[in-house]
Image: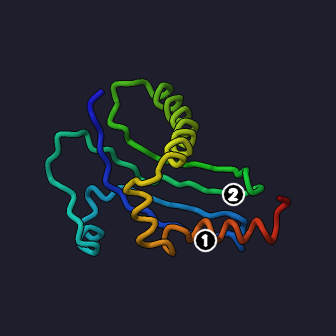
Amino acid sequence: MTDREIYFYAAGYDRIKENGSVFVFSKTINDDKVYQKKYAFNVPEKSDYVRLEYIFFIVEYIPITKKRAKVRLASRVDLKMNYLPQWILNKSARTFSFNYFKNMIKVNKNFKGSDWEKKVKQNPNFYNFFKSKIDEYIEKNLIH
């Protein structure tokens, strides 16, 4: 399989008061010239990689307790692998979803001194927004 790349934007929504969740929506911006112009970001015309496309990728995070949560994913992604049968792509997508969060947790445990940690320290309000909303919800509504 050849290397892949993706250019996307994402927006987060605080739905804690409405339904007890936080929600992140994202989509590719490969051909979205309006978005690229608005945010002064240009997706390169040519690339050595296969460029993925997705209409949407949604993550809904629903806290249950301080240490447990329910995560729901929905996506419509073109992996640019039309040579594979759809049932293999579907199975792979399901496996990816579970592995994605396991890997995210593993990586986050070891991010001390990383670029991520530096970004969080530069703009803590931005990066801690969802965490503070979730913590507040758990304190008010859930069993610890």
Left or right: residue 31 versus residue 74 is left
Residue 8 vertical placement versus 3 (above, below): below
Q: Dot 2: few (<14), some (14–19), or many (≥20) neighbours within 10 Å?
A: some
Quadrant holding the C terminus? bottom right
Residue 128, x across and y down, in percent: 55, 68
Residue sitting nearer the eye, 31 or 63: 63
Residue 14: which disc?
1
The residue lying at 20 percent from left, 63 percent from top is 42
* Disc 1/disc 2 C-alpha distance (Å): 11 Å
Give SS at disc 1: strand
Residue 125 vertical placement versus 9 (above, below): below
Q: Dot 1: few (<14), some (14–19), or many (≥20) neighbours within 10 Å?
A: some
Earlier residue among tags 1 and 2: 1
Amino acid on which disc 2 is placed: Ile
Left or right: residue 90 versus residue 70 is left
- The residue to which callout 2 is attached is 62
